[in-house]
Image (cartoon, helix red, strand yellow):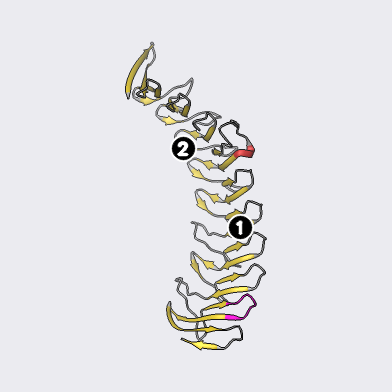
Amino acid sequence: MRFLCKSYNNSYVSMTEHIKYYDNGSIKREEWRIHEQLHRVDGPAVIDYYENGTIERQEWWVHGELHRENAPAWIEYYNYGTIEKEVWFERGAIHRENGPAVIRYYITSQSTLRYNDETIKAKAWWIHGELHRENGPAAIEYYDDGTIKEELWRIRGRIYRENGPAVIRYYNNGTVSKETWCAHGGAVHREDGPASIEYYENGTIKEEMWMKRGNAHRKNGPSIIRYYKDGIVKREAWFENDNNYHRDGEPAVIDYYDNGAAKKAKWYEHGDLVKKETYSLVKSARKE
């Protein structure tokens, strides 16, 4: 790798251009600096290149800070030349007022050199260096066909949504895969229902989990319920506040056959297994 340094002087400033080369002689990196700080007003202050000569990354810097007005200050490219990622910066912090500050793109193929809303991989809204959005998810991921894969709500960097799940994941067919409710600070939490709900691809519930501030907890019922695809209960589990299995005088874990009959039962006290039973389909118990 070779290096080259060029200086440009006028009556106001002294600008230096640093150039690094690959061994084959093609340019690897260009940098523009003033007083040793990355700075350029008429274009990107940093340009990185792939060895084949196409641009890998462009960075706009002003007086040592990533910054660009009304456009992304950081752009990464696939080696075919299409954009992979765009990031908006304001005075060194990721920031954009009226749109996502980070956008990532899929590339469809080497021969299809295009990107648009159908090929967006992810969007994220940032305000002054924090993931934040008031009236919608702060981060959205997409499948490569354009359907939504995940939505994440954040306020001032913290996972939170006031009236609904803070994280929603989707199957590729558009049906919901999982919903998660969170309290301020990101702990999984919900006051009036299950804090986590998983679904089968056909839309029926796969699992419900009641949680308070990150711990499995429910006052008058099992904290976790799992279901077969037809809605019949597959498992019920009772917990203490510290995520230990526990239930007074009755089994804390019950597994069911797909016809609804009990299959296994386990008694726990503060996380310690004290008894278990298995059942045939005619419910004849065998103690262990």
Amino acid type at image mark 2: Ala
Residue matched to label 1: 177
Q: Nearer the viewer, residue 209 or 285?
A: 285
On screen, 82 above or below 13? Answer: below
Residue 65: image location, x then y, percent: 42, 31
Residue matched to label 2: 93
Q: Main secondary structure of the magenta part?
A: loop
Disc 1 versus disc 2: nearer the observer: 1
Q: Is residue 138 magenta?
A: no
Which residue is at the far top? 11
Q: Is residue 260 magenta?
A: yes
On screen, 206 above or below 36? Answer: below
Residue 156: image location, x then y, percent: 51, 48
Location of residue 19 (image quadrant): top left
Amino acid type at image mark 1: Ser
Pick the quarter of the image with the N terminus. top left
What residue appears at the point 55 percent right and 32 percent down from the top-left corner? 110
Q: Is residue 38 left or right of residue 174?
A: left
The disc placed on residue 57 is none
Q: Which class describes the residues within 10 Å of circle 1: few (<14), some (14-19), or many (20+)?
A: many
What residue appears at the point 32 percent right and 21 percent down from the top-left corner? 3
Q: Which class describes the residues within 10 Å of circle 2: few (<14), some (14-19), or many (20+)?
A: some
On screen, 106 above or below 190? Answer: above
Q: Dot 2 lies on which element? A: strand
Residue 187: image location, x then y, percent: 49, 60
Query: Which range is magenta?
Result: 256-262
What residue appears at the point 62 percent right and 74 percent down from the top-left corner? 233
Q: Are marks 1 and 2 in contact (CB under 8 Å)?
A: no
Q: Nearer the viewer, residue 76 or 132?
A: 76
